[in-house]
Image: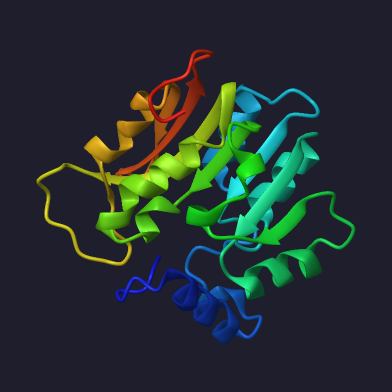
Amino acid sequence: MAGADDDTATWFESLYAGAGGDWDRIPWAHLAPRPSLVAWLDEQPPAPGTAALVVACGLGDDAEELARRGCDVDAFDVAPTAIEAARRRFPGSPVRYRVADLFELPAAWREAFGLVVEVQTVQSLPPGRQADGIDAIAACVAPGGRLFVRAAVRGDDDPVSGPPWPVRASDLRRLDDAGLEPVWERGDDDGSGWVNVAYRRRETRGPLA
C-alpha cells in the first residue's frame, strides 16, 4: 500500500519502522514466499543462474525462494527498515538487497533480468501512478525474459477506494504494449479476485521496451 498523500516512501518506512520487528503488524508480511509464486516456479522452474529481480521485496521471502532455486537475485524496497530486516532474517544470503525507488531504478537494470517478480506493488500506488509503475517494471525484463505479477484487478469503470487500489485491467494491458505476452494465469482458490499471471517478453522490442 501507499499513503493517501502519495508519499509512498515515507508511508512504507513508517509502517515497517513502527512495527518494531512485530511483522504480524504488516498485512502482507507472511514470512513465507507467496504460494502462487511457488506454484508457478514448480511448474515452470527458472534455469540455474537466471538473473532475477524482486520488486518491492519487503522482508525478502520471495527473493530467498528464487535464490534457493538457483537464481542470481537482486531485490529492492523503498523502505530501509524492510531491507535491514531482510538482511537480518537471512544472514549470508546471496541475494543483493538494496533500498531503491521503483521510479528511480539503476539504468543498468533496464532489460537486464530474465525473471522479474512483482507481488502486489502496483496496487500500492495511487491510480494516477499505476501505469508508470507498470512501465517501470516492464522495462526491467530482458528480451525473452519472464515477469510474474500478482495483483487485484478491477474493471476500468469500477469504483475504487484505497489504499490499496486494485489495478485497472487496461493499465495491466500495457504489458502487451511492452512486448510481454501472458503465458500462465491462475486465480486464487478463494474467489477473491486476485490474479497471478506470468508473462514472457518477445525477443523483438515493443514501444516501452
| 2 with respect to 92 (left or right) | left
Residue under the point 61% across and 44% down: 107
Q: Is residue 114 above or below residue 156?
A: above
Q: How many marks?
A: 0
Q: Position of residue 60 (x, y in %)?
A: 68, 57
Residue under the point 40% across and 49% down: 133
Image colouring: rainbow
Q: Position of residue 43 (x, y in %)?
A: 61, 23
In-front residue for pair 171/195? 171
Q: Position of residue 202 (x, y in %)?
A: 49, 15
| 199 with respect to 141 (left or right) | left
The N terminus - image quarter:
bottom left
Q: Residue furthest front?
A: 107
Quarter of the image where one finds residue 87: bottom right
In-front residue for pair 131/94? 131
Residue under the point 62% across and 22% down: 44
| 183 with respect to 187 (left or right) | right
Q: Is residue 17 above or below residue 107?
A: below
In-front residue for pair 116/101? 101
Q: Is residue 201 above or below residue 2?
A: above
Q: Is residue 4 above or below residue 173?
A: below
